[in-house]
Image (spheres, helix red, strand yellow):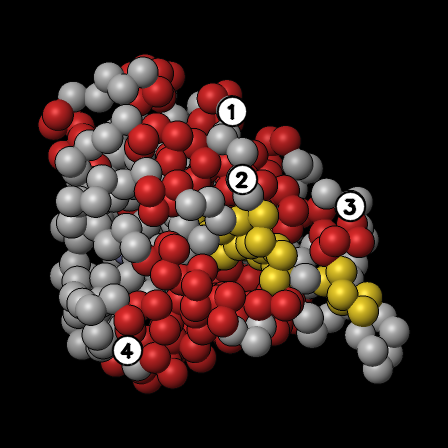
């Protein structure tokens, strides 16, 4: 893609400003069986919402290619990867992932979702700005098994790709989904170039927690003030690491309307949370990739509102500094 496609001109200053690059594929929805309990419509409904938004002109929506198998092996066992790719997972393994009834379309969906994460990561590193994938944040996927709607771990694969192949020295992963980033923590436990930080509800899934570099368990019903104070502490632990890349798992299941979250944070509280992250990375000049994460309101509208806010606000923030080096 030509660099010009990522820029818009500021009519007042004449400066080129960076468009917010997002990755999306219709298979994010269509690759999940319609009878699955997972709210698969969230992806296509979010895209419609963003298209209606006045921030849509600030976004550049890209189509991901399926990830290459060797990239998956950065974080996952070869046996697990090969059995998934050949549709050879056991029923027990599929049930642990939970996106059942299983469908062979899950294979291409998963590869595109992982490809979107990797392309967004490469873009953020190349441009020094913000990017995002309109899916994923698959933090419950472990080295050799999937769990909790997650097949492969896009955060771990992206972080390891960045440090091993993109010349990034330090990556921070900030996981603000209401569920702990257990797979991410376990896969990256011995990786000193990556710092894992998780804020989550102590009494929510996964019930056996892993150990991140920094964990911030919160009680149920924490609400805005305690939640935001804790986010500030978690963000400090990330930025103290002087990361050259921040991967932000921006799940919105801490919302009061969420059916699974238990945290009772307001829509405005979620926006303030995101803005604190955007402000911190911009102040320190750190490229950032946004991973969508969880959100399970019933009906789904409150979740969509919060995801709309996330990506629309990110697009606005991505405009607030001049474009850095473009490759
Ligand atoms: Zn979650």
Q: Quadrant of residue 19?
A: bottom right
Tell which circle, 2 or 3, labels the residue nearer the N-terminal end: 3
**Is 244 in front, or is 110?**
110
Mark-to-mark CA distance, 3 and 4? 41 Å
Q: Quadrant of the N terminus?
A: top right
Horizontal side of 49 relative to 208 (left or right) equals right
Q: Secondary structure at mark 1?
A: loop
Residue under the image location 24 percent in, 54 percent down: 39
Q: Position of residue 36 (x, y in %)?
A: 17, 44
Q: Quadrant of residue 261?
A: bottom left
Say whether marks 4 and 2 touch (CB < 8 Å).
no
Mark-to-mark CA distance, 4 and 2? 32 Å
Mark-to-mark CA distance, 3 and 1? 23 Å
Mark-to-mark CA distance, 2 and 1? 12 Å
Q: Quadrant of residue 255?
A: bottom left
Tell which circle, 3 or 1, labels the residue nearer the N-terminal end: 3
Q: Which circle marks residue 68 in the picture?
A: 1
Mark-to-mark CA distance, 1 and 4? 38 Å
Query: Would you name the residue on which mark 3 appears?
Result: 2
Q: Secondary structure at mark 4?
A: loop
Residue under the image location 73 percent in, 70 percent down: 321
Front tag of 3 and 1: 3
Mark-to-mark CA distance, 2 and 3? 16 Å
Tell which circle, 3 or 4, labels the residue nearer the N-terminal end: 3
Label 3 Cα crowd, 10 Å radius (few <14 / some 14-19 / many 20+): few
Front tag of 1 and 4: 1
């Amino acid at each position: 893609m030509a660099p010009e496609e990522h820029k818009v001109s500021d009519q007042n200053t004449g400066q080129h400003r960076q468009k917010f690059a997002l990755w999306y594929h219709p298979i994010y929805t269509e690759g999940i069986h319609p009878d699955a309990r997972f709210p698969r419509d969230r992806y296509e409904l979010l895209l419609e919402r963003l298209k209606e938004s006045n921030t849509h002109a600030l976004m550049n929506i890209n189509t991901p290619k399926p990830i290459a198998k060797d990239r998956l092996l950065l974080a996952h066992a070869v046996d697990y990867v090969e059995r998934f790719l050949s549709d050879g997972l056991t029923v027990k393994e599929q049930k642990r992932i939970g996106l059942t009834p299983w469908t062979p379309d899950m294979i291409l969906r998963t590869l595109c979702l992982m490809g979107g994460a990797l392309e967004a990561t490469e873009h953020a590193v190349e441009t020094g700005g913000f990017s995002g994938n309109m899916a994923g944040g698959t933090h419950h996927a472990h080295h050799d098994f999937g769990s909790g709607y997650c097949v492969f771990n896009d955060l771990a694969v992206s972080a390891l790709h960045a440090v091993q192949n993109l010349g990034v020295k330090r990556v921070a992963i900030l996981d603000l989904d209401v569920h702990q980033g257990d797979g991410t923590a376990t896969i990256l436990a011995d990786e000193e170039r990556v710092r894992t930080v998780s804020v989550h509800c102590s009494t929510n899934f996964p019930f056996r927690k892993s150990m991140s570099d920094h964990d911030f368990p919160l009680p149920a019903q924490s609400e805005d003030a305690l939640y935001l104070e804790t986010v500030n502490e978690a963000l400090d632990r990330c930025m103290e690491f002087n990361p050259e890349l921040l991967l932000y798992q921006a799940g919105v299941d801490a919302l009061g309307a969420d059916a699974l979250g238990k945290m009772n944070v307001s829509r405005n509280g979620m926006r303030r949370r995101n803005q604190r992250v955007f402000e911190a990375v911009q102040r320190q000049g750190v490229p950032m990739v946004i991973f969508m994460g969880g959100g399970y309101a019933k009906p789904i509208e409150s979740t969509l509102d919060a995801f709309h806010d996330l990506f629309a606000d990110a697009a606005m923030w991505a405009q607030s500094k001049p474009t850095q080096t473009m490759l």
